[in-house]
Image (tube, grey):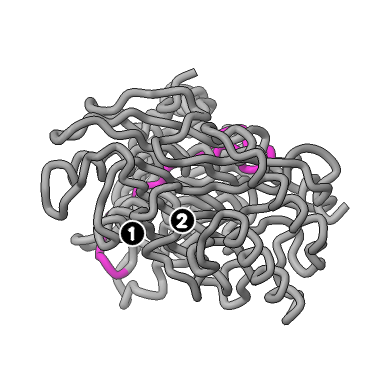
């Protein structure tokens, strides 16, 4: 199956797909079972062997931070050489003991890999508030370092929680100055409503670049991908994105060059498809929606988030019901904060069909157009375009439906 399978993500012409578990030159990874979860790998390590590796990072904006986020943010985020990640416990809310666990993990990985502790990024996912067992975690780090190899299969599996399958890809990218490789591993299916980062996404490239270029590309691409998704409107305590550039290809990407543009296009497509994959895996999701909102710049974001996070809109999407009244209700509630008395005269298209024009219904319930619309929203990807009064602003949000399975998964999660 092709990695680029969403109609909303186009593969750039200079990008081809490689084996999805492959890594760029200069990287090794591993994942092992340390007993943090009942089944499967739960501790992963990623390392860049080149001393000149540059990096960038983005984290959750939640005020309640996991210990790995707190400790990672204090590190050398522009020259990271390794990442240690685990599932089976988020190490959040465990006070100084949790901070100590994170720092000991960082220090052990650094010792085993011959690095400075500040060059090791951390990421933990799982139940919030429970103690992350320290001894099994550290034993897992030792085992993972011993198992390091040239592919990311174990790493991509070690970060899974309620994910149905690993989210990973590897791309060959032809830049004007030569060929490089770009890969990523991500996880996420619930507690998704990021702002400038997401659950976990680790990106590797063997292109060489200044740390400032890595940071610029990371910020731009994350804002167009992981910042645009919502499964349940809940902002995680542990969202983390790490991007590492080993430079092992010998191809250097300089600022404001065609190479930077071409690599940025590839990173953008990679992250957008992974973001869509996260939404599609939304703990029982049957289909996903893309909402585009246009109008006055100050109001489009709040309206888009309100619609995407509405349980009524999400359940209608799950049931393949083109119930546009729910969309207008959610949009109107958010729009009221910036309306300044202006009437709510909006246009709404669903799957390219105009259903509301100037605030009035434009399609007959039960007629041929309505029946065609009911069939259209049975697709796995459903697009909505909402045009508000005013101009100058446009945003998009990808969101999942809300299913019976989502309720079941989250009602039983701590067990």
Q: Which mark is residue 81?
A: 2
Q: Residues within 10 Å of mark 2 (few under 14, many from 20)?
A: many
**Percent coordinates x, y for residue 183 in the rendering:** 43, 37
Q: Is residue 223 shown above or below 33? A: below
Q: In this rendering, would 312 be left or right of 407? A: left
Total labels drawn: 2
Q: Is residue 289 magenta?
A: yes
Question: Going from the N terminus, do you reach mark 2 or mark 1 first?
Answer: 2
Q: Residues within 10 Å of mark 1 (few under 14, many from 20)?
A: some
> Residue at image x 29%, y 70%?
298
Nearer the viewer's eye, disc 2 or disc 1? Answer: 2
Report whether residue 234 is seen. Answer: no
Who is closer to the viewer here, 361 or 236? 236
- In the foreground, 80 or 309: 80
Q: Residue furthest left?
A: 257
Q: Position of residue 17 (x, y in %)?
A: 38, 24
Which numbered dot is residue 219? 1
Q: Which residues are magenta?
A: 279-298
* Rendered image: mark on residue 75: none
Which residue does the image show at 40% across and 35% down from the upper left? 24
**Left or right for 119, reference 37:** left
**Along the line of sight, the residue nearer the viewer: 145 or 232:** 145
CB under 8 Å between callouts 2 and 1? Answer: no
Residue 288: x and y in percent read: 52, 38
- The quarter of the picture where residue 123 lies is bottom right
């Amino acid at each position: 199956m092709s990695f680029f399978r969403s109609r909303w993500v186009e593969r750039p012409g200079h990008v081809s797909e490689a084996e999805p578990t492959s890594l760029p030159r200069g990287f090794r990874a591993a994942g092992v079972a340390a007993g943090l979860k009942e089944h499967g790998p739960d501790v992963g390590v990623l390392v860049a062997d080149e001393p000149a590796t540059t990096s960038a990072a983005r984290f959750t904006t939640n005020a309640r931070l996991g210990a790995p986020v707190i400790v990672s943010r204090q590190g050398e985020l522009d020259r990271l050489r390794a990442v240690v990640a685990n599932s089976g416990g988020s190490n959040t809310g465990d006070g100084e003991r949790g901070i100590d666990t994170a720092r000991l993990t960082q220090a052990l990985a650094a010792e085993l890999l011959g690095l400075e502790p500040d060059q090791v990024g951390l990421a933990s996912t799982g139940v919030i508030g429970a103690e992350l067992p320290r001894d099994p975690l550290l034993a897992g780090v030792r085992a993972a370092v011993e198992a390091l190899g040239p592919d990311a299969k174990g790493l991509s599996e070690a970060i899974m929680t309620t994910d149905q399958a690993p989210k990973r890809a590897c791309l060959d990218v032809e830049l004007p100055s030569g060929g490089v490789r770009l890969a990523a591993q991500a996880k996420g299916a619930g507690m998704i409503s990021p702002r400038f980062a997401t659950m976990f996404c680790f990106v590797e490239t063997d292109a060489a670049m200044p740390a400032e270029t890595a940071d610029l590309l990371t910020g731009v691409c994350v804002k167009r991908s992981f910042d645009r998704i919502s499964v349940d409107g809940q902002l995680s305590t542990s969202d983390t994105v790490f991007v590492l550039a080993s430079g092992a290809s010998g191809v250097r990407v300089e600022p404001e060059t065609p190479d930077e543009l071409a690599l940025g296009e590839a990173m953008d497509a990679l992250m957008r498809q992974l973001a869509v994959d996260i939404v599609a895996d939304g703990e029982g999701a049957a289909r996903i929606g893309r909402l585009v909102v246009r109008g006055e710049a100050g109001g489009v974001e709040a309206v888009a988030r309100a619609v995407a996070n509405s349980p009524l809109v999400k359940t209608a999407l799950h049931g393949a019901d083109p119930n546009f009244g729910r969309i207008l209700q959610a949009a109107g509630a958010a729009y009221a904060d910036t309306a300044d008395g202006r009437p709510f005269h909006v246009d709404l298209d669903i799957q390219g069909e105009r259903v509301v024009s100037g605030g009035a219904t434009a399609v007959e319930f039960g007629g041929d157009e309505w029946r065609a619309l009911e069939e259209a929203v049975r697709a796995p990807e459903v697009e909505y375009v909402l045009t508000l009064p005013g101009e100058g602003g446009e945003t998009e949000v990808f969101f999942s439906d809300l299913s019976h399975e989502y309720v079941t998964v989250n009602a039983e999660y701590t067990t």
